[in-house]
């Protein structure tokens, strides 16, 4: 019986590894790179215990506890600082990696008809599910060892072998846990979209429950698996039992997924799909209504995220002047201008970072047009009384409005948090001007995305390299003293940093003009090229 049900699980595992030969290494390299980069940066930025103690004071407020969790702030070594500020956020990223990849090989393959094709061969009924579990369990064990041994190899005094291995094991256990969550929802939902949405909802709920519990009721944070992440206290108490708890629950989830997969029909799910309306609304019958409907969940999630991100930066403004006075490297990054406090210069730089991050959702909204074309859905619209200009114009309008909403929400979040922690807070008008001045740069980035979709669709992903380049050269430019032209390759390099710099209308006007011209070229290209499908 077992031979029949699990037949050729090993062969299926090899097949999954073959398909993910690039995805898994890229995820592992990315997570490891940022994990190793942070403690090295901390060692340079906070080399003295006095500097770390000042940083610990800025962390002692409810907003920061809600964001990164609690820690022993009286013993704020480099190891404790790294685990406190990075472990939970990295665990969330690992959880997302697990959800995306496991969904792809379970419900995603079933939805695409690949599982039906596989089952027509001499392969066991549960082979694909268990091959997925096996591949990603091993992948997360590898991630644990890489991060654990890599952190220890950095040879930082307070980062001993046990704490480093625990740090890595926490990341790996989180990945295995959310692999279990995703395999269960892959049986309950009837679509990959539903599987991913429900799994990410559990991740978000776990984060919110932990945040509320850490701030107000410690017992509540025990309910959340992300609360278990902070309970490990890596480089401090080094508690291993939350790892055992996470792995134990994961095994139960894998068993439930196997049982549910064994008793359901292929293509079906246990959660009934909500029947759609018999007639679409007038809005949904238009290209812009369809575009908004397709992006609704992502847009709302990003809007909430931008507000929270702005609030998190605003919550640390109260103690910044004291902190900067004792840190030479941060002084160098935010070089002092006469007549302005370091906090004012810091906020103007943070606004630039928020603006670059706020560029991501409108670019995703614009690139959705390319995604729909890849799935060969665009031709169905263009086959009706919809012109190419109208179709691309609808997505452009969504992206432009999206960018305005995202930068505005980040400013509102920062201001709302800043007035609660600063003795002499910035006015709302000042904060909003500091943010909205970056909107023309966001428009230029959207126009570049339009140009790539319209003229060189295969290279649409290059827009993300441009965003990353902008972040690196402008945020770290002061520290590494890049020449001015390096920053001016990015549209964000032309924006005046209010209130430290005076408002300059000429570059703002030129950026808007450049955005219009590039967008027009993108439309011309989109009208001339062949549509896939």
Image: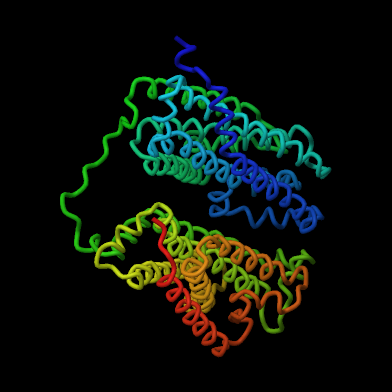
Of residues 460 and 232, which is closer to you in this image? 460
Of residues 512 and 116, which is closer to you in this image? 116
The image quadrant of residue 227 is: top right
Quadrant in which the N terminus is drawn: top left
The image quadrant of residue 188 is: top left
Reply above or below: 187 against 153: above
Q: How is the image coloured?
A: rainbow
Residue shown at 57% from the left, 35% from the top: 174
Q: How many marks?
A: 0
Residue shown at 45% from the left, 58% from the top: 302
Residue 510 placement (x, y as % from top left): 54, 86
- Side of 520 relative to 65 (left or right): left
Of residues 419 and 196, which is closer to you in this image? 196
Residue 532 placement (x, y as % from top left): 42, 58
Residue shown at 40% from the left, 58% from the top: 299
Reply above or below: 111 against 6: below
Residue 468 placement (x, y as % from top left): 62, 63
Residue shown at 54% from the left, 41% from the top: 95
Reply above or below: 63 against 145: below
Residue 310 placement (x, y as % from top left): 52, 63
Quadrant in which the C terminus is drawn: bottom left
């Amino acid at each position: 019986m077992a031979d029949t049900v699990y037949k050729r699980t090993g062969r299926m595992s090899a097949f999954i590894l073959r398909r993910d030969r690039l995805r898994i290494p890229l995820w592992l390299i990315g997570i490891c790179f940022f994990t190793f980069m942070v403690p090295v940066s901390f060692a340079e930025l906070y080399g003295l215990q006095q500097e770390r103690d000042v940083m610990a004071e800025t962390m002692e407020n409810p907003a920061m506890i809600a964001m990164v969790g609690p820690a022993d702030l009286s013993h704020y070594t480099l190891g404790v600082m790294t685990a406190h500020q990075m472990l939970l956020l990295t665990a969330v990223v690992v959880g997302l990696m697990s959800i995306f990849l496991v969904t792809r090989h379970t419900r995603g393959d079933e939805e695409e008809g690949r599982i039906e094709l596989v089952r027509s061969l001499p392969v066991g009924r549960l082979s694909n599910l268990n091959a997925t579990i096996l591949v990603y369990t091993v992948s997360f064990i590898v991630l644990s060892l890489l991060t654990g041994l890599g952190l220890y190899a950095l040879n930082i005094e307070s980062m001993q072998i046990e704490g480093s291995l625990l740090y890595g094991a926490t990341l790996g256990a989180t990945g295995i846990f959310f692999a279990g969550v995703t395999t269960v929802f892959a049986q309950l939902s009837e679509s990959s979209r539903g599987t991913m949405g429900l799994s990410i909802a559990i991740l978000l709920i776990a984060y919110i429950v932990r945040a509320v519990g850490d701030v107000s009721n410690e017992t509540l944070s025990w309910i959340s698996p992300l609360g278990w992440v902070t309970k490990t206290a890596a480089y401090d108490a080094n508690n291993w039992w939350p790892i055992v708890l996470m792995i134990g629950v994961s095994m139960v989830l894998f068993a439930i997924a196997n049982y549910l997969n064994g008793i359901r029909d292929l293509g079906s799910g246990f959660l009934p799909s909500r029947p759609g309306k018999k007639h679409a609304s007038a809005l949904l019958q238009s290209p812009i209504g369809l575009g908004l409907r397709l992006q609704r969940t992502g847009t709302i999630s990003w809007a909430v995220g931008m507000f929270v991100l702005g609030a998190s930066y605003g919550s640390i403004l109260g103690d910044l002047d004291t902190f900067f006075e004792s840190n030479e490297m941060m002084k160098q990054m935010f070089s002092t201008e006469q007549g302005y406090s370091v906090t004012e210069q810091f906020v103007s730089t943070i606004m630039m970072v928020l603006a670059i991050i706020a560029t991501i959702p409108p670019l995703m909204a614009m690139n959705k047009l390319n995604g729909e074309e890849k799935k060969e859905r665009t031709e169905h619209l263009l086959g009706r009384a919809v012109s190419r200009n109208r179709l691309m114009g609808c997505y452009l309008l969504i992206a432009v409005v999206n960018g305005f909403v995202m930068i505005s929400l980040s400013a509102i979040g920062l201001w709302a948090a800043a007035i609660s922690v600063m003795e002499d807070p910035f006015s709302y008008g000042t904060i909003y001007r500091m943010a909205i001045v970056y909107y023309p740069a966001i428009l230029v980035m959207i126009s570049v995305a339009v140009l790539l979709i319209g003229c060189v669709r295969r290279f649409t992903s290059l827009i993300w390299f441009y965003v990353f380049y902008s972040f690196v050269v402008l945020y770290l430019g002061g520290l590494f003293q890049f020449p001015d032209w390096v920053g001016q390759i990015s549209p964000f390099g032309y924006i005046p940093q209010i209130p430290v710099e005076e408002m300059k209308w000429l570059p703002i006007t030129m950026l808007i003009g450049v955005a219009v011209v590039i967008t027009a070229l993108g439309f011309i290209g989109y009208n001339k090229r062949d549509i896939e499908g």
